[in-house]
Every structure is written in structure tokens, then in C-alpha cells.
Image (tube, grey):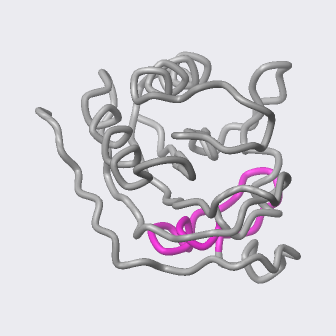
Amino acid sequence: MSRIFIGLGSNIGERVVYLNRALSELVELHQTTVKKISSVYETEPVGVKEQPKFLNMVAELDSTLRPDDLVRELKEIEVRVGRTLREHWGPREIDLDLLYYGGEMLNETTLQVPHPEISNRRFVLVPLKEIAAEFQDPLRHLNVEELLQRCSDTSSVRKTNRQISLQGKK
């Protein structure tokens, strides 16, 4: 089993509903166990600024799925939950990103692990720190706490009181 971290985000429609549905799908994913989830954070958009604020969170998984198979499953979950493809960095019902796959480093055309922008994104690092501050980035050789301290992103990341629960049959 590999220790895996997935970023979840939504900024269109019923954001909490989309996050809940995506987490329920992750719970049902074969060869995979959801171990922890962070709180939900309201965050400013990155890239295209003229769009609604996001709700973001991070989930920790254990899985025997290979990274490429896991990413394929994440894309299928996005479609089932209701994502409509729009502009890059634009609004989205749900977004699931593979942040880390254990200590693996992959640099392929369609898959980069660790996520190439993770060290520049407070909206990922803050919830990740909540559940895995000690996790060591295999590329940068810094833990999450250290990555956050060095992050140049100053955008707002505010913890909310919105509740997300792990639901599913597993």
C-alpha cells in the first residue's frame, strides 16, 4: 500500500455536496482506503481570478492502484460527480488532483508526481498540513510544514465549519 494524498476542490453550485459525493466515491474505490480527511477551507481562486471562491480539502488514501490507474479513476469520479470541462484553471464543480503517491516521483507527459505546483499553493498545503504536517516531499526533501513556511502564495485560506463525512459501504 502507498500513502497517497488527493486534493479536492469545488467552486460552482453546491460545493459541499460535490465534495461529499467525491469523497463517497473515493470510499468506494477498489483497492483503496480513505484514511483521513482535512477540514474544509474556503480559498481564493488561483490563475483565473474572476470566479467564485473554492472549497478545498485534502484526503489521505492507502491504495494498491498504480498512479496512472488512480488518476484515471479520479477523472472518472469527476465525471460521475458532475464535472463539466471548462477553461484551464477556471470554475469547476469538482476537481480531484493526485498530490503525492508515497515517495514516488514521476515525470511523464500526462502525469507528474509530486504535483508540480504543490509548493506554490497554500490552498493545498494548509489542509495537507492539518493531516500530514510531517509528510516528506520526495522531490524537495522538505516536510509539509516546511513547504508551507516557504510558500510565496499569500492568497486567503480560511478554515470553515462545513462538515464533510466519510460515507460509503466499505
Q: Is residue 6 above or below residue 85?
A: below
Q: Position of residue 90 (x, y in %)?
A: 75, 43
**Residue 46 in the figure: left or right of residue 26:** right
> In the picture, which quadrant includes the N terminus?
top left
Which image quadrant for residue 37? bottom left
Q: Is residue 133 above or below residue 86?
A: below
Q: Position of residue 128 (x, y in %)?
A: 55, 65
Q: Is residue 122 above or below residue 26?
A: below
Q: Which residues are magenta?
A: 125-144
> In the picture, which quadrant includes the C terminus?
top left
Tell me which residue sits at (79%, 62%) in the image: 119
User: Does 143 lie within the magenta span?
Assistant: yes
Tell me which residue sits at (52%, 61%) in the image: 55
Q: Position of residue 52 (x, y in %)?
A: 64, 59
Which image quadrant for residue 114? top right
Residue sitting nearer the eye, 152 or 142: 152
Q: Is residue 55 above or below residue 15?
A: below
Residue sitting nearer the eye, 143 or 108: 108
Residue sitting nearer the eye, 42 or 76: 42
Tell me which residue sits at (66%, 25%) in the image: 85
Question: How many numbered circles does the render carry?
Answer: 0
User: Does 54 lie within the magenta span?
Assistant: no
Residue sitting nearer the eye, 133 or 118: 118
**Residue 64 in the figure: left or right of residue 98:** left
Tell me which residue sits at (44%, 25%) in the image: 77
Q: Position of residue 156 (x, y in %)?
A: 69, 79
Which image quadrant for residue 31? top left
